[in-house]
Structures are given as C-alpha cells and as structure tokens.
Image (cartoon, helix red, strand yellow):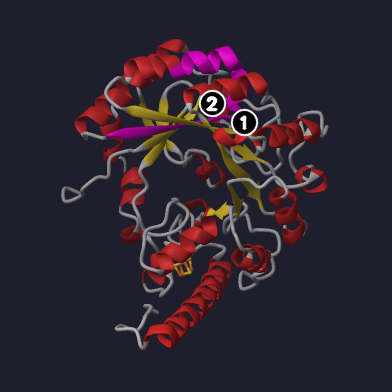
C-alpha cells in the first residue's frame, strides 16, 4: 500500500437532494437493501455546502488541478428549487476561487423549466436527462409514488432541451436497457430530438440478483444483442451527430486509447460521492450489492478528500487491475472491458472477485465492434493503397 500512487479526485457526484419525485422500480438508491438515505437530510445545508467548497479548494490547491467537476445528483437535484440551485452554485464558486469549477446536473426532467434553463445557460451548467424512451418504454419503470405517469413533463423537457436555446447546455440522454423495449424504436425515438449524446446502461444486477434474460444461463447474450442492434444503426449513420459513449469508449480502447467512463477499461476511478449530510462515499450504484457497500466512514467535516485514499474500497477502485478475479486478469478482453462495472461483479460468495455478470454480453459486444472497425480500417487501407501505393506499416491489433 505504501507504493501506491493515488490519482487525485477530479470530480464529485453531489447528492444535493436526497429524495426523489419519481419511484423508478429499478432505482439503486431507494429500491434496494441500503436504506441509509432515510437518515439523510432532504437537501444539503448551507453549512455543508460551505464545507464542501473548502474541501474542494484544499484538494485542488494541493494537487495543482486546473479544473474540477461537480455533478449535481439526487434523488432528484431539482427538488430543491431554482433558488437553492443558485445558492449552491454561488457558495461553491465563492469558496473555490483558485480554479474553474464545472457544474452539471443529472435530472429526471420532471421539474425542469425555462427559468432553470436560463439560469443554467447563464452559468454554463450542463444538463443530462434520464429517460428510458417513448411513453410506453419510459412508463414501464419510471412512474411517480402514486404509480402515475409524468411522461408529459419529461417530454416537455426533452423539447426544451432540444430547442436552439437548450442545446447550449444539453449533454444528452441516459437510458436503462429493458429487454422488453425495441432497441431500434428507442434509438429512433431519441434520435428525433437529435441529442448531442445518448447512453444505454446495463441494469444494475449481479450474481445474487441475476439480470432478466440471464436467469437461466449467464452464457445468454440478450444485452449484447440489444445493444448491437443500436450499434449497427448508429455506426453506419452518416453524418453521425450523436455520440454514444459506450460505443465510442470501446472503439477508443480497441485502438489503444483510454476510455472516458468508470464502466469500461482499467483506468483509476477518480471521483467520489458526497451525501447531503457531507458523508464521503464510494460510487452510489454499489447500493445494489450490500447495505454498507458505499460507506467509507468519512465526512467532509472530519476528513479531507486525501483521507479517502486510506480506504481499502477506494484503493481497490484505483488499483483496478490488481483487484480483478483471476479469470478477468487472464482474459484477452480485459484492457477494454476492465472486468466489467463493479456492481455487476458482485456475489455474496466472492464479493467483487467475479467476472461481470454480463461477461458473455461484453465479449460479444467487443468482438463485434472490433470486427466492424477492423473491416472499416481495411477498407480505408485498401482505398489508400489504390490511390498512393502500399502503406508503410500494416495496422495491427492486440488479441
Ligand atoms: S468480465 Fe469477462 S470479458 Fe470482462 S475481463 Fe472479465 S472475463 Fe474478460
């Protein structure tokens, strides 16, 4: 542990509000074994926000960081209202005077409106929207606490964000895959709004909470088949204005570059989560594994961000490869896959020392994308050779 070189935090997921106006049945915050949210204050107090600003200042100064990102999350971050949002941003900016702080909001879109958009544009705060598709797809899981659909509010928000004004701060759409939904229809529904990006998340399941479609056999690949249908449309669409991070990451890593998310690849995880009471925690989706999985026993009033590097849970996320199962360490896909997203690797028996419960899907996705990219590169090479004679070096890929 003494040889360990930490990667400083470059961003925080801030739970500014700890409740939600939706009651999504797959929610990792409110539908699983960890019910610690019930003890959290509804929203982050002014004193906690000031302390958060001081900790960010301390950390960014020590590591000479030039920028730092805050993703405002919940629950639903907009439940605090516009004035609260303004106050939060103001306090942070006043306390972190040494660097540029980038703010982003991840919202379910139910409370979003013109005034919030104007504020976000004026402060350059970006907006990501969570939705699962058209009304039928979205309402499969994303209803309110009375079981009522709020899809109309959501669709109004998509329209607002896809307007000329909204595009100034809109970062894209985030969708959780449900095998019951038609991938082509979901992609086509989202595409009509021409979002800057969309991403499709594998459901937060693991070995003791098997994913739908993989309960009988983990060799089945229904999630790869679903995602690859989207890939086949997206990849060949020209010009392509929509980014799909999952596919772009896989292509980048196949080409030897680094991925941009903690879900894929072997790069160190460089963010933490701050709860409304100031607790510093590990990535929140771990709540689907066991009740205290995210707990570090630290709070911004008593601990600096440096202190979290004493925590075994954080060290394991930074020294990612050393803490993978032997199967993953020896796997030829590991540089791209990274052993799978951490909650997907969990079982009570082996903790996180398993390949992803989506391993067979991941292998099929990577293989198919790799084949497609290689074919394309060979075509380019062939075209180039015809134009100007043979290229100097053949393009090669590691297995
Ligand atoms: S999860 Fe599967 S594909 Fe990924 S590294 Fe492990 S064994 Fe390989």
Tell me how far mark 1 sits from mark 2, CA to CA: 8 Å
SS at mark 2?
helix
The earlier-in-sequence mark between 1 and 2 is: 2
- 255 over 380 or under it: above or below: above
Q: Which residue bears the numbered disc 2?
A: 121
Tell me if mark 2 has few (under 14), some (14-19) or many (20+) residues whose alpha carbon lies within 10 angstroms of its own: some
Q: Which residues are magenta?
A: 66-89
Tell me if residue 305 comes above or below residue 51 in the rendering: below
Q: Position of residue 15 (x, y in %)?
A: 51, 28
Whether pointer 1 and pointer 2 mark residues with C-beta atoms closer than 8 Å, the reply is: yes
> What residue is at 32 percent from the left and 21 percent from the top?
96
53 or 281, nearer to the observer: 53
Compare residues 221 and 307 and report the one nearer the observer.
221
Query: Residue at the spot x=62%, y=25% of the render?
Result: 19
52 vs 323, nearest the viewer: 52
Tell me the residue that label 1 is attached to: 165
Q: Going 79% across and 36% down the picture, which residue do you hit?
A: 151
* Residue 303 appears in the picture as rendered: no
Image coordinates of residue 198 in percent, x first then y, are: 60, 49
Residue 275 to residue 291: above or below? above
- Residue at x 60% of width, y 29% of height: 75
| Left or right placement of residue 165 versus residue 344 in this view | right
- Magenta residue check for 69: yes
Q: Quadrant of residue 386?
A: bottom left
User: Tag 1's secondary structure?
Assistant: loop
- Measured as percent of width and height from the top left, residue 349 is found at 49, 58
Q: Nearer the viewer, residue 230 or 176?
A: 230
């Amino acid at each position: 542990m003494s040889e360990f070189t930490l990667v400083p935090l470059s961003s925080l997921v801030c739970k500014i509000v700890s409740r939600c106006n939706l009651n999504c049945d797959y929610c990792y915050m409110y539908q699983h074994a960890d019910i610690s949210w019930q003890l959290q204050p509804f929203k982050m107090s002014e004193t906690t926000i000031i302390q958060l600003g001081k900790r960010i200042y301390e950390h960014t100064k020590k590591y000479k960081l030039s920028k730092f990102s805050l993703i405002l999350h919940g629950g639903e971050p907009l439940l605090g209202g516009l004035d609260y949002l303004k106050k939060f941003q103001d306090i942070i900016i006043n306390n972190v005077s040494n660097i540029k702080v980038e703010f982003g909001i991840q919202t379910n879109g139910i409370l979003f409106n013109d005034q919030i958009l104007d504020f976000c544009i004026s402060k350059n705060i970006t907006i990501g929207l969570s939705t699962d598709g058209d009304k039928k797809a979205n309402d499969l899981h994303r209803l309110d606490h009375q079981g009522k659909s709020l899809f109309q509010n959501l669709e109004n928000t998509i329209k607002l964000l896809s307007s000329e004004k909204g595009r100034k701060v809109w970062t894209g759409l985030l969708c959780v895959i449900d095998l019951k939904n038609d991938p082509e229809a979901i992609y086509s529904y989202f595409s009509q709004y021409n979002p800057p990006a969309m991403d499709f998340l594998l459901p937060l399941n693991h070995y003791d909470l098997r994913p739908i479609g993989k309960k009988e056999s983990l060799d089945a690949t229904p999630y790869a088949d679903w995602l690859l249908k989207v890939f086949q449309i997206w990849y060949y669409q020209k010009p392509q204005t929509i980014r799909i991070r999952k596919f772009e990451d896989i292509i980048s890593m196949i080409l030897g570059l680094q991925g941009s998310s903690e879900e894929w690849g072997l790069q160190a995880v460089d963010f933490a989560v701050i709860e409304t009471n100031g607790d510093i925690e590990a990535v929140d989706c771990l709540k689907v594994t066991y009740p205290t999985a995210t707990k570090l026993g630290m709070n911004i009033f008593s601990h600096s961000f440096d202190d979290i590097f004493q925590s075994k849970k954080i060290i394991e996320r930074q020294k990612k490869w050393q803490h993978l199962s032997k199967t993953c360490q020896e796997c030829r896909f590991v540089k791209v896959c990274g052993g799978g997203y951490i909650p997907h690797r969990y079982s009570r028996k082996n903790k996180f020392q398993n390949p992803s419960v989506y391993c067979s899907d991941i292998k099929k996705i990577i293989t198919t994308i790799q084949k497609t990219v290689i074919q394309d590169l060979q075509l380019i090479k062939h075209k180039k050779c015809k134009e100007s004679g043979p290229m100097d070096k053949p393009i090669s890929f590691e297995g």
